[in-house]
Image: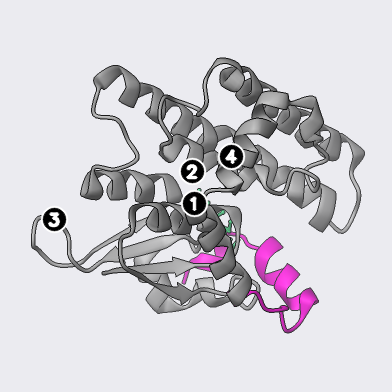
C-alpha cells in the first residue's frame, strides 16, 4: 500500500494519474497547502522541501522498512522501478522518456508555475514578469507540439513523460495559451484527458477541493516563504 501525500495541484495530479494507470493500491493523505499543512512536522519528515507530492511505500520491493519519496519526478521514477510499468526497458526509448521527464521537471513545470504566479497570484501586475513567463510557457508548448507532430505520445508508448507533462497543460487558459495554436499538442491533450485513469484521478481531486478558510492567510502561507519559514 502506498500512502500518497497530496493536494489538488498539477504536481499532485501526476502521481494520482500514475497510480490510477497502474492500479497500485493507495490512500490519499490530503495536505491542504492553502491551510499550511505542508509545514506540519510529520509532513516535513517525509518532504523536507514543504511541497507536495510525497509518498510512503509501505511494501518496498526489497522487503525492508517503508521508503518515503518526495519530488514528483523522483516519485514517478521510484514507482516505475517498483512496477516496471509506463517506462520502456529498451535503453534508447528509456533515455527519451527520461529526457522528457526532466524537461518537464526543469522547464515546463517551473515556467508554467511562475506564469501562474505572476499572472494570477502576484499582488502587483508586473508586465515584464508576466510576458517573460507567458512567452516561455508558449515556447515550451511549441517544443512539445513539435515533438508530437509525428508520434502519438511524447516518447514512444504512453509513459511517465506524458503523465508528468499533462497536468501542466490542463490550466492552459490560465497560462494565456491557446491550444488551437498547437494542433499536435491539442490532439495529445484530448487523448490523455479521455483515458479512464486520468478521469478517475481528476475525480479524486474534485472530491477533495475545499475553499481555503482565509484567502489572505493562504496567500501569505504560500507566497511569503523564506529561509525563516523552514529554519528553526
Ligand atoms: N519540484 C517539486 C515541486 C512541488 C511543488 O511546487 N508543489 C506545490 C504544489 S504544486 C506545493 O506543495 N506548494 C506548497 C508551498 O508552496 O508551500 C515537485 O515536482 O514535486
Q: Earlier in the sequence, mark 3 or mark 1?
A: 1
**Label 2 SS:** helix
Residue at 34%, 53% in the rendered image: 22
> What separation in Å lies between label 2 and label 4 (alpha carbons)?
12 Å
Q: Which residue is mark 3?
A: 61
Ligand 1 quadrant in view: bottom right
Q: Earlier in the sequence, mark 4 or mark 3?
A: 3
Ligand 1 neighbours mark 1 (CB distance < 8 Å): yes
Q: Earlier in the sequence, mark 4 or mark 1?
A: 1
Image mark for residue 191: 4
Highlighted magenta segment, given as a residue range: 208-232
Q: Are marks 3 and 1 in contact (CB under 8 Å)?
A: no
Q: How is the image coloured?
A: one colour
Q: Earlier in the sequence, mark 2 or mark 1?
A: 1
Question: Closest to the observer: 73 or 178?
Answer: 178
**Label 4 SS:** helix
Q: Nearer the viewer, mark 4 or mark 3?
A: 4
**Label 1 SS:** helix
Q: Residue furthest left?
A: 63
Q: Nearer the viewer, mark 4 or mark 1?
A: 4
Relative to 123, 183 lies left or right: left
Residue at 29%, 48% in the rendered image: 78
Q: Are marks 2 and 3 in contact (CB under 8 Å)?
A: no
Pointer 1 local density, CA inside 10 Å: few below 14, some 14–19, many at least 20: many
Q: Is residue 98 above or below residue 110?
A: above
> What separation in Å lies between label 4 and label 3 (alpha carbons)?
32 Å
Q: Earlier in the sequence, mark 2 or mark 4?
A: 2
Residue at 44%, 50% in the rendered image: 72
Q: Which residue is mark 1?
A: 14
Q: Is residue 219 magenta?
A: yes
Ligand 1 neighbours mark 2 (CB distance < 8 Å): no
Amino acid at each position: 500500500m502506498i500512502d500518497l501525500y497530496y493536494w489538488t495541484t498539477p504536481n499532485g495530479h501526476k502521481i494520482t494519474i500514475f497510480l490510477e494507470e497502474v492500479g497500485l493500491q493507495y490512500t490519499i493523505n490530503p495536505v491542504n497547502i492553502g491551510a499550511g499543512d505542508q509545514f506540519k512536522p510529520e509532513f516535513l519528515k517525509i518532504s523536507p522541501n514543504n511541497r507536495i507530492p510525497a509518498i510512503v511505500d509501505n511494501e518496498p520491493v526489497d522487503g525492508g522498512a517503508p521508503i518515503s519519496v518526495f519530488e514528483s519526478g523522483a516519485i514517478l521514477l521510484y514507482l516505475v522501478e517498483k512496477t516496471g510499468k509506463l517506462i520502456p526497458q529498451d535503453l534508447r526509448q528509456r533515455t527519451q522518456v527520461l529526457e522528457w521527464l526532466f524537461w518537464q521537471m526543469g522547464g515546463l513545470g517551473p515556467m508554467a508555475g511562475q506564469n501562474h504566479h505572476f499572472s494570477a497570484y502576484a499582488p502587483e501586475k508586473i508586465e515584464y514578469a508576466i510576458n517573460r513567463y507567458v512567452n516561455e510557457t508558449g515556447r515550451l508548448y511549441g517544443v512539445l507540439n513539435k515533438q508530437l507532430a509525428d508520434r502519438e505520445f511524447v516518447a514512444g508508448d504512453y509513459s511517465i513523460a506524458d503523465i508528468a507533462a499533462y497536468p501542466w497543460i490542463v490550466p492552459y487558459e490560465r497560462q494565456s495559451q491557446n491550444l488551437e495554436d498547437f494542433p499536435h499538442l491539442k490532439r495529445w491533450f484530448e487523448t490523455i484527458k479521455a483515458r479512464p485513469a486520468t478521469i478517475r484521478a481528476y475525480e479524486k481531486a474534485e472530491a477533495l477541493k475545499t475553499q481555503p478558510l482565509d484567502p489572505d492567510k493562504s496567500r501569505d502561507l504560500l507566497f511569503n516563504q523564506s529561509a525563516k519559514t523552514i529554519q528553526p
